[in-house]
Image (spheres, rainbow, N blue to C red):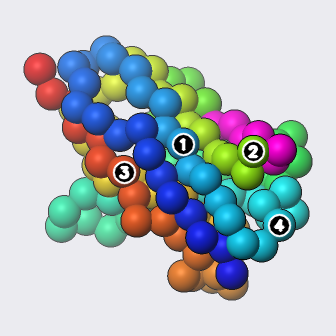
Amino acid sequence: QVQLVESGGDTVQPGGSLRLSCVASGDSFSTFAMTWVRQTPGKGPEWVSRISSSGTYRTYADFVEGRFTISRDNRKNTLYLQMNNLRPEDTALYYCAREPRDTYPDDRGQGTQVTVAS
């Protein structure tokens, strides 16, 4: 099992930027893919982005539209999400999770809150 702790959430104005971090401990971080998911009250989880174990392959949800960049530093056991040009609809609790989700449903962090408001 892996333990995941996110940080970096904050309140920003529309158009602002944030970088989220997710530090992993436990199982070998460099051996598995990771994903970012976001959730708002009353809605189910919404997948944001995924990165392969080596960092070579990255995929994004359509709503990202080139504004976010996922990355990882396997030497530091850390996953990142750089978010630029934030919109009010990006307001959510963002959490990182180990892939595949159906195999490791409990390997996720508690999340970090992102609020975009003027």
Q: Pointer 4: what residue?
A: 28
Q: Is the C-beta separation of discs 1 and 2 under 8 Å?
A: no
Select label 1 or label 2 by which is in front: 2
- Going by the numbered disc 2, the residue's amino acid type is Lys
Select label 3 or label 2 by which is in front: 2
Q: CA distance from mark 3 to mark 2?
A: 19 Å
Q: Quadrant of residue 85?
A: top left
Q: Pointer 2: what residue?
A: 76
- Give left or right: position of 79 versus 86: right
Residue 13: x and y, percent? 21, 20
- Going by the numbered disc 1, the residue's amino acid type is Ser
Instruction: Answer few, some or many: residues within 10 Å of disc 2's Cα (few below 14, many 20 plus, some between 14 and 19).
Output: few
First of labels 4, 2 by sequence position: 4
Residue under the point 66% across and 73% down: 2
First of labels 3, 2 by sequence position: 2
First of labels 4, 3 by sequence position: 4
From the viewer's side, name the closer residue of 59 and 56: 56
Q: Which residues are magenta?
A: 70-75
- From what the image shows, is residue 21 above or below residue 35? above
Q: Which mark is residue 21?
A: 1
Residue 95: x and y, percent? 46, 57
Identify the element where label 1 is drawn. strand
Residue under the point 23% across and 31% down: 11
Give the residue at the far left of this rendering: 118
Q: CA distance from mark 1 to mark 4?
A: 17 Å
Identify the element where label 4 is drawn. loop
Q: Quadrant of residue 97?
A: bottom right
Q: In this rendering, does residue 69 appear at all?
A: yes
- Going by the numbered disc 4, the residue's amino acid type is Ser
